[in-house]
Image (tube, grey):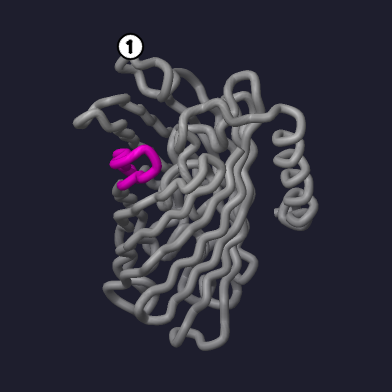
Amino acid sequence: MRIFYYFKHIALFMSCLLSLSVLTAQAGDRLLGTGGVSQIEGAGGGGLTPWALIAGYGTDAQLGGAAFFTRAKTGDDFELNTGGIAVGFYNRLELSLSQTKFELGSTVPKESIRLNTLGIKLRVFGDAIYDQDSWVPQVSVGAMVKHNEDFDLVPKLLGAKDSTGVDYYLAASKLYLDAVFGRNLLLGATLIATKANQFGLLGFGGDLNNDYQLKPSYSAAIMLTDNLLVGMEYRYKPDNLSSFNENDAKDVFVTWFPHKRFSITAAAVDLGDVADKTNQTAWYLSGQISY
C-alpha cells in the first residue's frame, strides 16, 4: 500500500505529535498504568492484544502518548524486535505506528521479515477508570493496517496470499478499584477480525483459508503493589496455511513502574508452533515511556 512508502515521514510526524503533547498539554493526570503497555503491534494494551484503553496518560482535556521497544527470543533462535509510538488524543482517539523485525534463525539463516503496522483506535463509550458506579466497560473499536516488506522471501512461498492486511477489532476493558484484597483489577476482552498469519509476519490468508475470521483475546491483570502489575493474556489466532500449523498465543507478564512515566515489562510467552519449529516458548522484555 502507498501509505507505507511514507512510513518514515509518518513516524516523524507522530514523534512530533508526541513531543507536542508533552510540551503543550502536560498530559499525565490519569492513574498509573491506565494507558496499558504497548502490545507488539503498537497499540495500547497488553503485550499480545490491544485493550480498549487509550495509550498514554492524557485525560479528555489532554494529549498523551507512549514510545516503546520490545525484544523477544525463543529457544530455537527466532528473534523479534519491535518499536513504535502511539499518540492519544483527549482520551478518545489513538494513533499508533510500529515496525517489527523478525529474525528467522536456523529456519532461514541470516534472513529476517519486517512488518509495518499503522493503527487507529476510537473509544466509543464508557470509561474503564472513572465509571466505577457502573458495570459498563470502556469499549473501543480499532483497526491495524499491516504491510509485510519481505513477503516474497518466505510468506509467499509458504502459501500466503497477500503482503498487506487489515485487522479490525472491538475491545472492552474495565478497571475495578480495590477489587481484590484492596488491589486494582483490570479485565479485558478483544474480538479481532483477521486474516493474519503469525500476526502478519507470514503474510495474510492462505491455501486453507483466505477469509476473515473472528478471533477472541482475553486479558487479566492485578496491581500487586502500587508500582507492580502482574497479568496474563490469551490470544486466539487463525490457521490459514497447510504448510505449517499455527497455534494460539498466551503469556504471563510482570510490569514494573519505577516511575509513572516509565515501565518495564517482562513476560514468558507460549507461541506454540512457529514455521518449522514446534512448541516455541520465548522470553519477552519491553520498555515504555508514557506521557
Quarter of the image with the N terminus is bottom right
SS for dot 1: loop
* Residue 250 magenta-highlighted: no
Asked whether 122 or 173 is in front, the reply is 173
Query: Does the image show residue 24?
Result: yes
Asked whether 206 or 33 is in front, the reply is 33
Q: What residue appears at the point 43 percent right and 54 percent down from the top-left corner?
A: 265
Q: Quadrant of residue 99?
A: bottom right
Quarter of the image with the C terminus is top right
Disc 1 residue type (three-letter):
Asp
Q: Name, please, the residue furthest toward the left.
A: 181
Q: What residue appears at the point 46 percent right and 54 percent down from the top-left corner?
A: 264
Q: Name, please, the residue furthest toward the top.
A: 133
In this rendering, position of residue 67 left or right of residue 173? right
- Count the marks: 1
In this rendering, position of residue 205 left or right of residue 147? left
On the image, the x and y values in percent for residue 29 come to 56, 26
Q: What residue appears at the point 63 percent right and 33 percent down from the top-left corner?
A: 64
Query: Does the image show residue 118?
Result: no
On the image, the x and y values in percent for residue 157 come to 51, 77
Residue occupied by mark 1: 133
* Residue 226 magenta-highlighted: yes
Asked whether 188 or 35 is in front, the reply is 35
In this rendering, position of residue 81 left or right of residue 22? left
Q: Which residues are magenta?
A: 215-230
The kind of secondary structure the magenta stretch mainly shows is strand
Asked if residue 154 is positioned above or below residue 201 in the image, the reply reads below
